[in-house]
Image: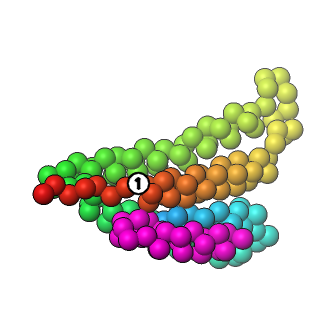
Amino acid sequence: DALVAGAAEGNVMLDGKDPDATRMAVPVVGSLLAVPAWWMVVHADSFVGAMAWLAVEYLVAECWFGPTVAVLQSTAGAGRGGTAQGLFTLTGAVGNLAPSLVGVLYASATAAPSGTDAAASPGTGALGDLIGIGVCAAYFASAVLFRVAAMAPPEKKKA
């Protein structure tokens, strides 16, 4: 389903005349394809299966970087490219705090109340659910945001 949705989305975006909108089709499709790939990583029956799906997930999920930087640089304008790239990098650095947030959420979800047996706490199933749903939702939200960025009207060039 994600493959069909991704292909349809790419076809709609490629019909436009704006080259930046066309470039943004790659991250939209990649983010949509990353949803089922990540779900399979978390729910694989074996380590080898999880690693195979992780390789697929990396291939489709990380394809956003090049087109996004190209669009950023082409739309930032003269004299603003360095600032735009710096803010983009800062955003990525903030995003790298997500694993810590997941750890805090997992710890709070699995913490045994004081005076109870810690062995009765939920185990790795809770972590799998948290990561599976959270990451898939983030990939879907990324696809939506990349699509919104692609729909932005091109900046008019000053004469």
Vertical arrangement, residue 101 with respect to residue 5, above or below: above
Label 1 CA crowd tier, 10 Å (few <14, some 14–19, many 20+) = few
Q: Nearer the viewer, residue 100 or 139?
A: 139
Q: Nearer the viewer, residue 148 or 2?
A: 148
Q: Residue at x 75, y 68 (%)?
A: 44
Q: Is 2 one of the magenta-colored residues?
A: yes
Q: Over which residues does the magenta segment extend?
A: 1-26
Q: Is 136 one of the magenta-colored residues?
A: no
Q: Residue at x 55, y 48 (%)?
A: 99
How many marks overall? Answer: 1
Residue 47, image quadrant = bottom right
Q: Residue at x 73, y 53 (%)?
A: 128
Question: From the viewer's perspective, is 114 left or right of 93?
Answer: right
**Residue farthest along the top direction in this orientation:** 115
Q: Which residue is mark 1?
A: 152
On the image, the x and y values in percent for residue 102 come to 61, 44
Picture quarter with the N terminus = bottom right
SS assignment at label 1: loop
On the image, the x and y values in percent for residue 17 come to 38, 71
Residue 107, image quadrant = top right
Q: Residue at x 79, y 26 (%)?
A: 113
Asked if one can make out residue 84 in the rendered structure from this viewpoint, the answer is: yes
On the image, the x and y values in percent for residue 142 come to 53, 55
Asked if one can make out residue 53 in the rendered structure from this viewpoint, the answer is: no
On the image, the x and y values in percent for residue 155 come to 28, 55
**Residue farthest along the front direction in this orientation:** 159
Picture quarter with the C terminus = bottom left
